[in-house]
Amino acid sequence: MIDPSDRLELWLHYATGTKYRQFSAAREEYYYLEEAFEDVQKGRMERLSMLSEDVQKRLKEAAADGFMDRYIRWLDKNNVHVVTASSYAYPALLKEISDPPSVLFYKGTLNEDMQLPLAIVGTRRCTDYGKDVARTFGRELVKAGATVISGLATGIDAYAALGALSVEGAQDPTVAVLGCGIDVVYPKGNEKLYGAIAERGCLLTEFLPRTPALPQNFPIRNRIISGLSLGVLVVEAGERSGAAITARLALEQGREVFAVPGRITDLMSVGTNNMIRRGEAKAVTAVSHILEEFGEGSYSEEGQAVRFEELSPVEQRVVKALESGEKNEDELLESCACSVDELIPTLTGLTFSGIIKQLPGSVYALDPLQTNIVY
Amino acid sequence: MLSQANSFGLTGLNGFPVKVEVDISAGLPAYETVGLPDAAVKESRERVRAALKNSGFEFPTARITVSLAPADVRKEGSVYDLPIALAILCADGRLKQAPLIRAVYLGELALNGDVRPVNGVLPMVIAAQQRGESVFFVPRENAQEAACAAGVRVFPVENLAQLVAFLRGEGGMEPQPRTEFAPEDAAYPFDFADIRGQAAAKRAAEIAAAGGHNLLLAGTPGSGKTMLSRAIPSILPPMTLSECMEVTKIHSVAGHRGLVTARPFRAPHHGASSAAITGGGSNAMPGEISLAHMGVLFLDEFPEFHRDVLESLRQPLEDGIVTVSRARMSCTYPASFMLVAAMNPCPCGNRGSRTKPCTCTPVQIQRYARRISGPLLDRIDMFIEMNDVPFEDLSGKGTGEPSAAIRQRVMAARARQRERFGAESTQLNARMNNRQIEAYCALDGPCRLMMERAFQRMNLSARAYQRLRKVARTIADLDGSETIREKHLSEAIRYRQLSILGGNEL
């Protein structure tokens, strides 16, 4: 249910939208918004002349009889909750930034004191490497007690959220910040994930309901992702990407920025590698590197360990061969000196044990995110 | 005067006898053909008239009635030109009646009197032989094909004048010697030895050939999907004589002359209509799946085929036959083929390549995967992703095993299957029903554990579970093992993994 005390702020936000400055200007002019509402209803716009014409027009529109009732009824019916900047439930970290959103719409539960909020962002065109890393970090950070903030885009954001949701029994493991109205599912392919987060986490946006996912919305959305978080982890980013914008905003807001290094030949690691090279981001190769930064040093990674000597001779040869990088079956046959009908069952066995993983194109690689091999 | 000559017709692969009757009576010159003739049969009048004239015979100036009996079955094509011409000569008193009803005459006439080849000669000869006919006069180009049938004397006919002279007892024709089959020596244009690398894909092809499993190849453009598929007929066991006959019959109906001794390889384009694939047309001709009978049907760019075409493959894949029904007729053709499908790993084709980046979004990849998923994918036993081959490797020397060696193993595995199935109608692992799977594909403790893990990780359907057991059975057969062991099942599981299908968890 929408709190009646939020009604007038919702009214003002309906007109100003993401224009944070106009919202605060009106707020400074009137200590009691009731007066503003009355003035607008009676057509006295003198004290609001500093607002743009467009905003004034919308204020009048929304002050019409019954408009706000319908608006609030719609929000209630769709289970949309509202938190305003003046509310005690408004996320404390977000209040600190220079341009905090005046009103937030959300579905699910917005935890008042979010534990260790950390953003995971990255490219929509992630590689299988990025997918694995995003999922693992999402999962392990939640296990360590953190809340994963992401943007519900395809690619890295989605996999980070999936990883976070995969921890069973975790309380409010993830928050997704949308670049569109709370009732708009974008991208369409994430519909299932959208539902899962609404149920077990929190979907959040400052955009008015029904706002489509316009390209210019995303940079505005990105400041909320970083603003909600203590730190931002960039998993994969191309040379110019939204993730890089989020990282820059995070630095401006005084938040920590981390980046996962990638191969210098990977297009989708150019952005992250550049951030590390310029000193904008701290290189991170394990979940504990992030946690140490926030004094949560007690966490130990949960990956399983396998003793090398317990592997069969063929398995040992495969693992040895893969230590120097990923290989396809032809290359493995060459370096393992075994027949194809020996190799293939071995590969399935190692994959099922989580020691290696299969990549597209019948390429195999060790999977240190899942299994450590102890020699 | 009245006369008669024997000929044959076809519906689908089944022949039926046709009696060509000619009556010449006094009256205004006229020519009438009855007995449900199609346009080609009606036009035979002009060909017969010119051929008779140009062979030195006079075309009778009288009322001519040609009847093709039985009168209620539609007659098609130009095969009746020759018997009509002979019956006219006989009715005109220039030929004796006796030889015309003691033999079967097939052939189209050219205007100069030459005899041209026709379609479907072998199925007609076989059907006629089963009805007690033994002497055949067929166009010279069809003689080799006709002489495959046992217990027949086939005379190759060059032209009308030569045949008339022979029928008048002037000699000049020799029967065609019996055509010898040598399916073992059939030559295949592609050999496994020519394919570089791709050890896993070759192994998958070997297993698929041994058990008759359908195979889906995914790989970057240029990784050798087409070449590997083209080489698959060369590792299948040679066809038996009766298989050769069956395949030749189908190809004869479709108008391909000559004997088929090599296993067919058919590669229809992805724009093909469902009638072209399963068979159709007003005269219900065999389609690509029947032409691929006993061989390989290769569908390149699998997801690009029309949805209805792919759906129409489902029933023949299960039954090994296809019934083509049209308003006028309904024909059943054999269609027992090995399906080899090929696809790119993603819309741009570069997923899994090490040299070129993939530019597809996850949504595009999901949409691409959805085009092949569902019931059809459930009918394909084995998936394999090809390795990306760098250019240097392609230009290097091939070191692969020759097809002949692989074929030996395939034949040994098939012999083991025959021994196991005994008198049952199923002879290949891929065609086992659920009862046979229970009986022959028992899983021991470690295998069951493996299967449980596979289920957890791979989200398998019940049908996929049965397919896994069949493929494991074939791998055990290749290994000469009585029971399915863990390594056989592990290998089978490998052929159920396709990275593009793994991405739809969002």
Image: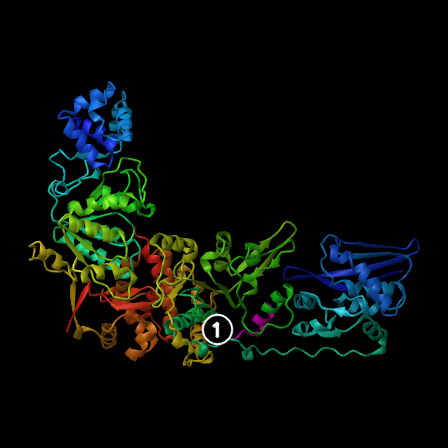
User: In the rendered image, is residue A177 in sight?
Assistant: no
**In which chain is the residue bearing label 1?**
B
State the residue in front, B270 or B277. B270
The C terminus of chain A is located in which quarter? bottom left
The residue where tag 1 is placed is B231
The chief SS type of the magenta part is helix
| Quadrant in which residue A15 is drawn | top left
- How many neighbours does mark 1 have within 10 angstroms: few (below 14), some (14-19), or many (20 or more)? many
Task: Name the outermost residue toward the top.
Answer: A42
Q: Nearer the viewer, residue A352 or A187?
A: A187
Residue A34 visible in this rendered orientation of the protein: yes
Image side of residue A126 versus residue B218, left or right: left
Q: Per the image, is B146 magenta?
A: no
Residue at (15% x, 45% y) in the render: A171
When the figure is inspected, residue B365 is found, relative to residue A367, above or below; the finding is: above
Residue range highlighted in magenta? B234-246
